Amino acid sequence: MLRRTFLFGSVSASIFANDDAARNIVHRSEISGPALQPESLIFVPEEHGRKKKLPLLLWLHGASLRGADTSMLMRYGPPAVAEKRGEFPFVVLSPQCPPGRLWTEDDGSLIKLVDEAMGMYDTDPKHVYLTGLSMGGGGAWWMGSQYPHRFGAVVPMCGPTQPKDWAAGLRKMPIWVFHGEKDKVVPIKRSKDMVKALRQVGNKPKFTIVKGKGHDITAMYNDNHIYDWMLSKKVKS
């Protein structure tokens, strides 16, 4: 069963310092918006509250996990990987998008939630990262382009793209793109076009085509190379 925490006003992260169990916590916030329902998941590593501040990873889920039930967010992606492993190098923030909405409809609530989580869990502002899959991949592209000085790296997976609108904002962002070779839901051309646009503005994104795979490339989140690569990047002031 997921533990719940409720945030009303300012709550110190120190109340969690003596809880050594790594887990996903249901975090209810007063922050919500058209693309954000009030409850999110936050994975808290065992080493939270010890000597050094931990990095934060924001994960945006795909369309199938939209709703008002955060237990759905445990089906795949970083929250599931982190819970299964127990040891994971990030505080993982996993918001949930309401039914019928898109991450790209966000009104600024998502970045406010990031700020709230960073303050509550005392994370390292120089090590904040962004990833998403499918609809969440599109959300990661979009959010990275809107807040390029808030994230150290972006890892979009099989997401829809808008190269003309988003490439300029991502010009200096470290990016690692993943897309299934045989994706029929979001054709790989969407990522190829975005990578091309990024190269035209001077970016040099990493681009991994997952051979033989369609839209479901959730297994890529088991690859430690992705997390190691993220951690090698820092937020640029």
Image: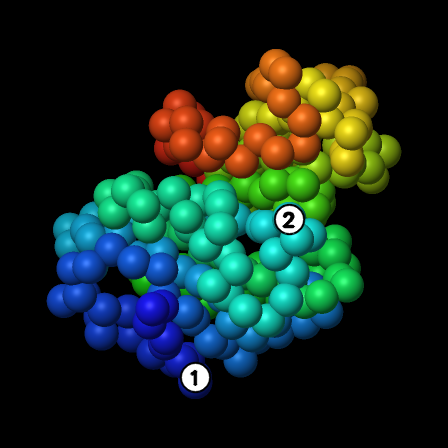
* Viewer-nearest residue: 226 or 51: 226
Which class describes the residues within 10 Å of circle 1: few (<14), some (14-19), or many (20+)?
few
Could you tell me which residue is drawn at 67 percent across and 71 percent down?
Answer: 33
Taking the image as shown, residue 60 lies to the left or right of residue 233, namely right
Which class describes the residues within 10 Å of circle 2: few (<14), some (14-19), or many (20+)?
many
* Residue at far top of view: 211
Q: Amino acid at mark 1?
A: Gly
Could you tell me which residue is drawn at 64 percent across and 48 percent down?
Answer: 62
Q: Amino acid at mark 2?
A: Gly
Residue 78 spot, x, y in % from top left: 44, 44
Render colour scheme: rainbow
Could you tell me which residue is drawn at 24 percent across and 55 percent down?
Answer: 22
Taking the image as shown, residue 162 lies to the left or right of residue 103, namely right
Q: In this picture, is 26 found above or below 214?
A: below
Taking the image as shown, residue 123 lies to the left or right of residue 197, namely left
Q: In this picture, is 20 found above or below 197?
A: below
* Residue at far bottom of view: 8
* Residue at far right of view: 164
Can the viewer see residue 119 in this picture? Answer: no
Taking the image as shown, residue 162 lies to the left or right of residue 115, namely right
* Viewer-nearest residue: 68 or 230: 68
Q: Which residue is mark 1?
A: 9
**Quarter-wise, where is residue 194 in the image?**
top right
Q: Nearer the viewer, mark 2 or mark 1?
A: 2
Residue 127 spot, x, y in % from top left: 40, 42
Q: Which type of secondary structure does the marked residue at label 1 adopt? A: loop
Q: Which type of secondary structure does the marked residue at label 2 adopt? A: loop
Q: Which residue is mark 2?
A: 62
Kindly report the distance in space between the C-alpha atoms of the residues bearing marks 2 and 1: 30 Å
Can the viewer see residue 14 in this picture? Answer: yes
Locate the N terminus by quadrant. bottom left
Residue 192 spot, x, y in % from top left: 76, 20
